[in-house]
C-alpha cells in the first residue's frame, strides 16, 4: 500500500517514475531522499526533488543527459548533478560517506556504496529517510518517520560528532525549528551548547543562507530565542545576545531581546523587513544612559544602522539588502519623534527619505509597538494610520515619491551661465529643500531664488 502522499512517485508520466526507470535500466538504485521525503510525508509542497544513487557522478550525467531538458554541475565535487525536466528541478547525488569540513573551508567528500551510510551522514533523522524507486520502499534506519510524527529534531548519530563534522548543522537545527515548528531534542541542544564555538570555521555565506531561511519562517521568534540561549548566536550575530540584559522602560516587562523577537514575529516574512526587525534596536546597549529621567538610548537608531551595516556586510548579504536594512533601522523612530502631529513638509521628508522602503518602514514602525498597555498601543497605531492617510492625500496632490524642484540642473546652468560642478548641486539642493518645505512652486520663483543665490555667491 502506497500512502496517498507518496502516490506522485508512481505516476508513470511523473519525473520520479521516469528517472527511476532510467536508473533501473542502468542497473543502479535510486532513492528519493532528504527534504523531499520529509516534505512529502508532511504533505508540504517541495520545490525540488533530491535523489541519491550508487552511480558515480559521471554515470549519473550519462544516465540523465539525454532525458533531461538541461543538466548543470552544481557540485560534481560533492557528487551532485542537477537537472531540469518538465520544469521540475532534480538533484541526483552519489551516496556519500564522509564530508569533512573541519579544518578547511573546502569540504572533502568520499563516496559510498550503501544508502544507510549516506543517511547516517545527514543532518537530522527527519532528513535521513530514503524511498527506493520505483517500488516505493521506505528505508528509515534512524527512526526518522517516528521523529516526524513526534516533531522532534535530532541527529542520526552522536550529535557531538555530527556537529563537529559540520558545525553548520547547529544553525540548521534552529532553521528547522523555525520553519517546521519542531522541537530540538534535549541531548541535541546540549551538544550545541558545548560545540557552538565550532561555528567559527563555517563560511559567512553558508551561515547567511541558513539565517535567511530561518527568518522567513512563519514565526522565527522561539527558534531565535533558543539559538541565542544555546550560545550559537554569539558566534555570528553577537549583537543579539547583547540585547538580553537591556531593560527598556518603553516595553515594560520585557527586555529588548524579547521585544525584538516579538517584532520579528509580527513582521511579514520578507527578508529585508525581518532583518530590519531583528536589528532595529541593536544600537541600544551602546547608547544606554541612566540619567535623572531614567534610562535613555539617544540616537540608538543611528548607531544601530551603522552596526547593522557592518554585521550584514560581514555576513555577505548583497549590497542592496545591507543598504535597505540599515536605512530601515535608521528611520524606524522617525514617526515617534513627530509626536506633535505631521506638517506637510515632515510628511514629504519622511516619504522622500523612505523612498522604496516606505511600505516596509510603516510596517516596521507598526510592528515595533509591543506594549502591554492596550490604550497606548491603540494611540500609536492611530498615529501611524494618520500618517498613512496624510501620505495618501499628499501623494494624490503631488507625486511625492518623485519630488523634484520645478527646474532642472540644465535650466539653472543656462540661466546662471555656469558649468557643471558642485555649485550646480548646491543650488539644486536649495531648490529641492524649498520644494519639500513649502510644496509645489513655479519655475519663475525657482529662477528668482537661483539668481539671488548666484548674486550672494558672487557668481
Ligand atoms: P529545504 O526545504 O530548505 O530545501 P532541505 O532539507 O531539502 O530543506 P537542503 O539544504 O536542500 O535542505 O539539503 C537537502 C538534504 O541534504 C537535507 O534534507 C539533508 O538530508 C542533507 N543535508 C543538507 N545539508 C546538510 C548538512 N550540512 N549536513 C548533513 N546533511 C545535510
Ligand atoms: Mg532542499
Image (tube, helix red, strand yellow):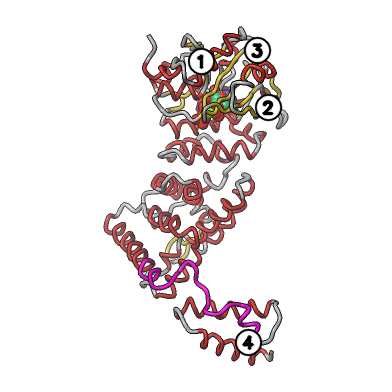
Label whose residue precedes the other's in the sequence (1 or 4):
1
Q: Residues within 10 Å of mark 2 (few under 14, many from 20)?
A: some
Residue at the disc numbered 3:
112
Q: Position of residue 348 (x, y in %)?
A: 45, 71
Label whose residue precedes the other's in the sequence (1 or 3):
3
Q: Which residue is situated farthest in the top direction here?
A: 27
Q: Residue 101's mark?
A: 2
Q: Position of residue 15 (x, y in %)?
A: 50, 21
Q: Residue 130's mark?
A: 1
Is the magenta region chiefly helix, strand or loop? helix
Describe the element under mark 4 as helix, strand or loop: helix
Label whose residue precedes the other's in the sequence (4 or 2):
2
Distance Cα–Cα, label 1 vs label 4? 76 Å
Relative height, residue 351 to residue 159 (above, below): below
| Mark 1 or 2, closer to the camera | 1
Describe the element under mark 1 as helix, strand or loop: strand
Q: Position of residue 171 (x, y in %)?
A: 55, 33
Tell me if the residue at label 4 has its CB under 8 Å from ligand 1: no
Distance Cα–Cα, label 3 vs label 4? 78 Å
Distance Cα–Cα, label 1 vs label 2? 24 Å
Label whose residue precedes the other's in the sequence (3 or 4):
3
Is residue 388 toward the left or the right of residue 161 in the image? left
Amino acid at each position: 500500500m502506497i500512502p496517498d502522499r507518496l502516490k506522485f512517485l508512481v505516476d508513470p508520466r511523473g519525473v520520479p517514475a521516469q528517472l527511476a526507470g532510467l536508473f533501473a535500466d542502468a542497473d543502479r538504485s535510486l532513492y528519493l531522499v532528504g527534504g523531499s521525503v520529509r516534505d512529502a510525508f508532511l504533505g508540504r509542497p517541495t520545490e525540488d526533488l533530491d535523489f541519491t544513487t550508487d552511480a558515480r557522478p559521471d554515470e549519473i550525467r550519462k544516465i540523465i543527459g539525454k532525458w533531461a531538458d538541461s543538466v548543470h554541475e552544481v557540485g560534481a565535487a560533492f557528487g551532485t548533478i542537477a537537472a531540469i525536466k518538465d520544469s521540475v528541478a532534480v538533484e541526483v547525488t552519489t551516496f556519500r560517506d564522509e564530508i569533512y569540513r573541519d579544518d578547511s573551508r573546502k569540504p572533502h567528500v568520499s563516496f559510498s556504496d550503501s544508502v544507510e551510510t549516506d543517511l547516517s551522514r545527514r543532518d537530522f533523522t527527519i532528513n535521513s529517510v530514503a524511498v527506493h524507486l520505483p517500488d516505493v520502499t521506505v528505508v528509515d534506519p534512524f527512526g526518522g518517520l517516528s521523529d516526524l510524527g513526534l516533531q522532534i529534531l535530532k541527529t542520526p548519530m552522536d550529535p557531538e560528532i555530527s556537529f563537529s563534522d559540520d558545525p553548520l548543522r547547529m544553525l540548521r537545527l534552529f532553521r528547522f525549528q523555525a520553519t517546521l515548528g519542531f522541537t530540538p531534542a534535549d541531548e541535541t541542544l546540549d551538544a550545541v551548547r558545548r560545540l557552538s564555538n565550532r561555528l567559527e570555521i563555517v563560511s559567512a555565506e553558508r551561515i547567511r543562507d541558513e539565517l535567511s531561511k530561518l527568518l522567513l519562517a512563519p514565526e522565527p521568534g522561539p527558534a531565535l530565542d533558543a539559538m541565542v540561549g544555546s550560545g550559537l548566536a554569539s558566534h555570528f550575530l553577537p549583537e543579539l545576545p547583547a540585547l538580553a540584559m537591556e531593560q527598556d522602560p518603553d516595553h515594560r516587562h520585557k527586555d529588548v531581546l524579547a521585544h525584538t523577537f516579538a517584532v520579528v514575529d509580527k513582521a511579514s516574512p520578507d527578508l529585508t523587513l525581518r532583518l530590519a526587525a531583528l536589528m532595529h534596536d541593536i544600537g541600544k546597549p551602546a547608547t544606554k544612559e541612566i540619567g535623572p529621567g531614567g534610562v535613555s538610548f539617544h540616537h540608538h537608531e543611528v548607531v544601530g544602522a551603522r552596526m547593522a551595516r557592518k554585521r550584514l556586510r560581514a555576513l555577505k548579504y548583497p549590497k542592496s539588502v545591507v543598504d535597505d536594512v540599515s536605512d530601515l533601522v535608521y528611520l524606524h523612530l522617525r514617526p515617534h519623534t513627530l509626536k506633535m502631529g505631521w506638517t506637510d513638509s515632515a510628511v514629504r521628508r519622511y516619504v522622500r527619505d523612505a523612498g522604496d522602503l516606505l511600505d516596509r518602514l510603516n510596517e516596521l514602525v507598526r510592528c515595533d509597538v509591543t506594549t502591554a498597555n492596550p490604550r497606548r498601543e491603540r494611540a500609536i497605531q492611530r498615529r501611524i494610520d494618520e500618517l498613512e492617510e496624510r501620505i495618501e492625500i499628499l501623494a494624490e496632490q503631488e507625486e511625492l515619491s518623485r519630488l523634484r524642484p520645478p527646474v532642472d540642473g540644465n535650466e539653472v546652468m543656462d540661466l546662471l551661465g555656469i558649468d557643471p560642478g558642485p555649485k550646480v548641486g548646491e543650488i539644486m539642493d536649495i531648490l529641492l529643500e524649498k520644494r519639500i518645505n513649502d510644496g509645489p512652486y513655479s519655475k519663475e520663483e525657482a529662477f528668482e531664488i537661483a539668481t539671488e543665490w548666484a548674486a550672494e555667491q558672487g557668481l
